[in-house]
Image: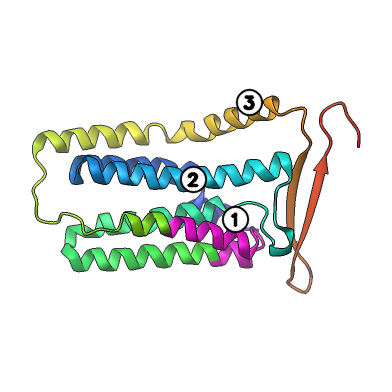
Amino acid sequence: MAIKPIFLEAGAAVVLLPISLIIFAAYAVREGRVRAVLWLRTFGTAYGAVLASKAAFHWWGISIGSLGLYSVSSHAMLTAAIYPVLFQRVASLWGERGQAWGWGVGLAASMTMCVVLALGCFHTVAEVLFGAVLGLWVAVANRGTLQTTAKLDVKKGVVLVILLFAILSLVGYVKPIKKAIWREMQNSFSSLPTYSRFMRSSPAGICQISVIKIAPRGREF
């Protein structure tokens, strides 16, 4: 399906995790340590919860099948957390009214992603909702009015530019690092069975869910 590689990449961790670091750097340089730490703490907590839900299902099969909740959607969480804050930061150049518009545009973009995830059978409605709630908690916690009139001194400007280039240079390493970590986790839990949730759309347009349990290496059920 063409929509997956084109649109859903905008919600992928390989794209949004570097952006989350850029937001952190912008807070640290522009708004101060308190705002930067708040972003790091809330975003880290939410993303950690997403990863924990995925690990819990993958290795232990922990889920609530009656609700269609097998893990929390990282695409929904990341877009709901990052886009409103990112667009608000960019639009702060046009004052408080710009910030309000930026927040609204970012929120609309993240909600569009959530709708596509559910209607496209990429995630269940419950997985998307839980991800969106986590992400919105992060966004709302970090929404406070940004500085719009204070001048950025030269030293801070240089530091911010250096941080931006340093973070952007890491973009190409996100996916290999993610794969390496996943491979090490697979090796560490190789004695456990693994669970996978698959979704596909029926000819009638209904999302059908199937869960598969795979035996550990060298073992049979």
Segment tinted magenta in the rendering: 115-136
Residue 204 image position (x, y, % from top left): 77, 74
Q: In the image shown, does 61 or 207 lie closer to the viewer? A: 61
Q: In the image shown, does 77 or 161 lie closer to the viewer? A: 77
- Residue marked by disc 1: 4
Q: Quadrant of residue 58?
A: top right
On the rendered image, what quadrant is the C terminus found in? Answer: top right
Residue 76 image position (x, y, % from top left): 52, 57
For the residues marked 3 and 2, what is the alpha-carbon distance in whole angstroms? 19 Å
For the residues marked 3 and 1, what is the alpha-carbon distance in whole angstroms? 27 Å
Residue 183 image position (x, y, % from top left): 65, 28
Between marks 3 and 1 in the image, the one whose residue lies nearer the viewer: 3
- Residue marked by disc 2: 47
Q: Main secondary structure of the magenta part?
A: helix
Residue 88 vs residue 173: left or right? left
Q: Residue at x 8, y 48 (%)?
A: 151
Identify residue type, mark 1: Lys
Task: Give the mark nearer the N terminus: 3 vs 2.
Answer: 2
Q: In the image shown, does 63 or 178 lie closer to the viewer? A: 63
Identify residue type, mark 2: Tyr
Q: Which element carries disc 1, helix, strand or loop?
A: helix
Q: Which dot marks residue 184?
A: 3
Between marks 3 and 2 in the image, the one whose residue lies nearer the viewer: 2
Task: Give the mark nearer the N terminus: 1 vs 2.
Answer: 1
Identify residue type, mark 3: Glu
Q: In the image shown, does 199 or 69 lie closer to the viewer? A: 69
Q: Residues within 10 Å of mark 2 (few under 14, many from 20)?
A: many
Q: Is residue 128 magenta?
A: yes
For the residues marked 1 and 2, what is the alpha-carbon distance in whole angstroms? 22 Å
